[in-house]
Image (cartoon, helix red, strand yellow):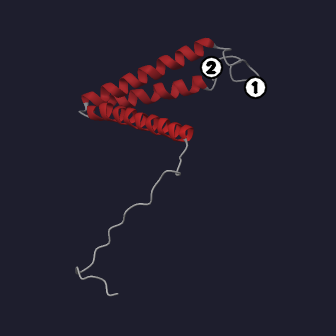
Amino acid sequence: MRMIRAAFPLGFKADLLRHGIGCEGAGRAGAAPSSCPTRHAIGAATTALALAIIISAKFTECAWITVLVIPSVILLLQAIKRYYEELEMRLRDDGLSLAEVRPPIVLVTKEGWEPPDG
């Protein structure tokens, strides 16, 4: 639990740096996005350090399955999304032609096999 308490201030510091606090001219309106390149490096480093602390805390507290399962589920869902997008493009490109479709054969069940009265 101590590791997670250490990760919170690091993430907070990265958030402050992202919003330009502590870097002259970076938070002003009209300032160039890369007006403080060290800000991005420091923010990336603190975020990576916070991530490393959180992942190590998960492994030491026997919650390692979340580190493995959550990315696996995300990858699976992305693969399913790509499949459906590809399928949609194929269906949209080919179109759907119903000109050669025959009516289906339908079987209706009855209680008995008597010939119809006629």
Q: Which of 32 and 27 is in front in this view?
A: 32
Q: Which residue lies furthest to the front in this view?
A: 118
Task: Name which of mark 2 and mark 1 comes first in the sequence.
Answer: 2
Residue holding disc 1: 29
- Look at label 2 and name its amino acid: Gly
Q: In the picture shown, does residue 47 fall above or below 105?
A: above
| Image side of residue 43 versus residue 3, left or right | right
| Image side of residue 67 versus residue 84, left or right | left
Residue 99 lies, in percent from the top left, at 53, 51
Q: Quadrant of the C terminus?
A: bottom left
Residue 23 lies, in percent from the top left, at 65, 17
Query: Quick one: label 1, few (<14), some, or many (20+) residues within 10 Å?
Result: few
| Image side of residue 53 versus residue 31, left or right | left
Q: Assess whether mark 1 and mark 2 are in contact (beta carbons under 8 angstroms).
A: no
Query: Residue at 55% across / 43% down in the picture?
Result: 95
- Look at label 1 and name its amino acid: Ala
